[in-house]
Image (tube, rainbow, N blue to C red):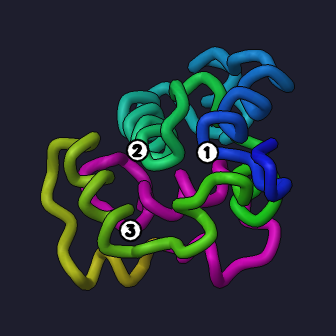
Amino acid sequence: MDAMGFLSGKRIKQDFIGARSAQSDDDFLARCELNRGHADAAIRVRAAIATLAGVEPGYVHAEDTFDGDLAHFDFWGSLDSVAIVLELEKQMGIPISDEQAQRIVDPESVRDLTVAQFVRSVLEAVPGNGVQ
């Protein structure tokens, strides 16, 4: 904590990581209730979230909520939908149309939205991931 009582972004990340263990990809997928056919895309969505939060993907758990567990990160306080779509495109290696982006659940608009629910939302909105 600095002299004014604020935690730095670096300290927030250290505390976040220190308070949990990494969740394996297999456990993440199981908790997202996804089959192996969705594994690659789901792991890439997780990587996009982790990149925006500035942590390693293993520390983003399927049951984390955006307004709870991940709210400590500056990015989630003022979620920029363009930034998340750009990072998803980068991680997934595919373009996401405006229409598809509008179908992805906005973490700021849904109370207690979990990472697993967000992952499923992305997979449903973006074709080619096996979710109908």
Q: CA distance from mark 2 to mark 3?
A: 16 Å
Residue 51 placement, left or right of 109: left
Observer-side mark, 2 or 1, equals 1
The x, y position of residue 44, in whole percent, is: 38, 36
Q: CA distance from mark 2 to mark 1?
A: 18 Å
Residue 75 numbered tag: none
The amino acid on which the numbered mark 3 sits, given as a three-letter code, is Ala
The x, y position of residue 123, in whole percent, is: 42, 55
Q: CA distance from mark 1 to mark 3?
A: 32 Å
Q: Mark 3 and mark 2 in contact (Cβ < 8 Å)?
A: no
Picture quadrant where residue 41 is located = top left
Residue 48 numbered tag: 2
Other residues around mark 2 within 10 Å, as few (<14) / some (14–19) / many (≥20) = many
Residue 125 numbered tag: 3
| Quarter that holds the C terminus | bottom left
The x, y position of residue 71, in whole percent, is: 72, 59
Q: Which residues are magenta?
A: 105-132
Residue ID at (16%, 43%): 93
The prevailing secondary structure element of the residues shown in magenta is: loop
The amino acid on which the numbered mark 2 sits, given as a three-letter code, is Ala
In the figure, 31 relative to 97: above or below? above
Observer-side mark, 2 or 3, equals 2
Residue ID at (65%, 27%): 59
Q: Please give the count of numbered marks on the rendered protein.
A: 3
Where disc 3 sits, the SS reads helix
Other residues around mark 1 within 10 Å, as few (<14) / some (14–19) / many (≥20) = few
Residue 9 numbered tag: 1
